[in-house]
């Protein structure tokens, strides 16, 4: 089945130690998104890629970076994780950035713990 | 700017009963899309149902249906014949046309009990 895959599902890192979260998709969608979701809160969009074009949300801290080497893969890099970065990180994809419903398909998430 | 409000942090329902989750939104867009997403505990978020604002007919997907009141900017979700597997956090969301980001409400935690 076509899907959005996130690895690892659980990640533990130390305060200030860089960490990379991975997302891959078999849907061949051209838009990929990264969300941060803290406990009992709605997902918060960090940034998205439309093909190779990177679009950062205005309030996303510089500590968060992303890479998309090809259509299938997208990475979230947290350069110096703080305790406040502990959260679930969701990757999502959608077919087109333009018109139409273009629903987003979500991965299972990576739960990040910062010690 | 779009906003989405879910005024019910938690709801409970017994198996086989019907429950309605509320959602109101505000937008300046002439056309837009509305969604209900389900996020079960420790599982991924999935789309339950969607509504295109220019369609007057309420969307229905099996046991899930919406009551879309465009003038009132209301988009409630009705779950009929509730099942234990319906236990989850439910997020209402909206998005404009073109590329615009999905705006989520704060969610309603639904517990279905035997």
Image (spheres, coloured by chain):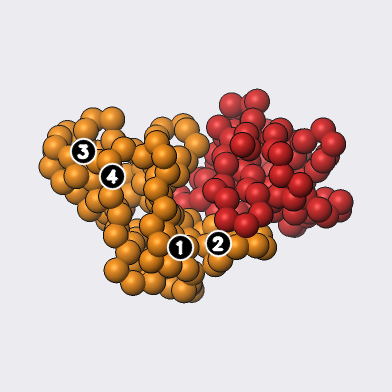
Q: Disc 2 on helix, strand or loop?
A: loop
Give the mark nearer the N terminus: 3 vs 1. 1
Asked if disc 3 and disc 1 are in contact, CB closer than 8 Å, the reply is no
Secondary structure under tag 3 reads loop
As drawn, is A48 to the left or to the right of B33? left
- Chain painted orange: A
4 and 3 marks on the same chain? yes
Residue that label 4 marks: A64
Circle 4 packing at 10 Å, graded few (<14), some (14-19), many (20+), is: some
**Which residue, given by chain and number where applicable, does mark 2 sit on?**
A97
Number of the label disc, if any, that sits on residue A81:
3
| Residue position marked by numbered label 1 in the rendering | A50
| Residue A54 in picture, x, y percent from top left | 38, 57
Q: Read off the chain for label 4.
A: A
Do the dots labelled 1 and 4 sit on one chain? yes
Q: Do tag 2 and tag 1 residues touch (Cβ < 8 Å)?
A: yes
Going 71% across and 44% down the picture, which residue do you hit? B29
Residue B87 seen by the camera: no
């Amino acid at each position: 089945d076509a899907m959005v895959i996130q690895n690892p599902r659980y990640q533990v890192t130390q305060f200030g130690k860089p960490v990379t979260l991975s997302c891959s998709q078999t849907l061949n969608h051209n838009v990929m998104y990264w969300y941060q979701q803290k406990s009992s809160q709605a997902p918060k969009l960090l940034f998205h890629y439309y093909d190779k074009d990177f679009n950062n949300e205005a309030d996303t801290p510089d500590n968060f970076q992303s890479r998309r080497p090809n259509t299938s893969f997208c990475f979230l890099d947290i350069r110096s994780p703080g305790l406040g970065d502990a959260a679930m990180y969701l990757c999502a994809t959608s077919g087109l950035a333009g018109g139409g419903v273009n629903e987003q398909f979500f991965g299972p998430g990576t739960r990040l713990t910062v010690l | 700017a779009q906003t989405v409000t879910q005024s019910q942090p938690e709801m409970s329902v017994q198996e086989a009963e019907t429950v309605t989750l509320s959602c109101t939104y505000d937008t300046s867009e002439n056309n837009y899309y509305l969604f209900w997403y389900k996020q079960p505990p420790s599982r991924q978020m999935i789309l339950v149902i969607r509504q295109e604002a220019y369609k007057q007919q309420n969307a229905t997907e099996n046991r899930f249906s919406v009551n879309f009141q465009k003038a009132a900017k209301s988009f409630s979700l009705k779950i009929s014949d509730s099942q234990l597997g319906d236990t989850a956090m439910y997020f209402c969301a909206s998005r404009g046309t073109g590329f615009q980001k999905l705006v989520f409400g704060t969610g309603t935690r639904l517990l279905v009990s035997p």
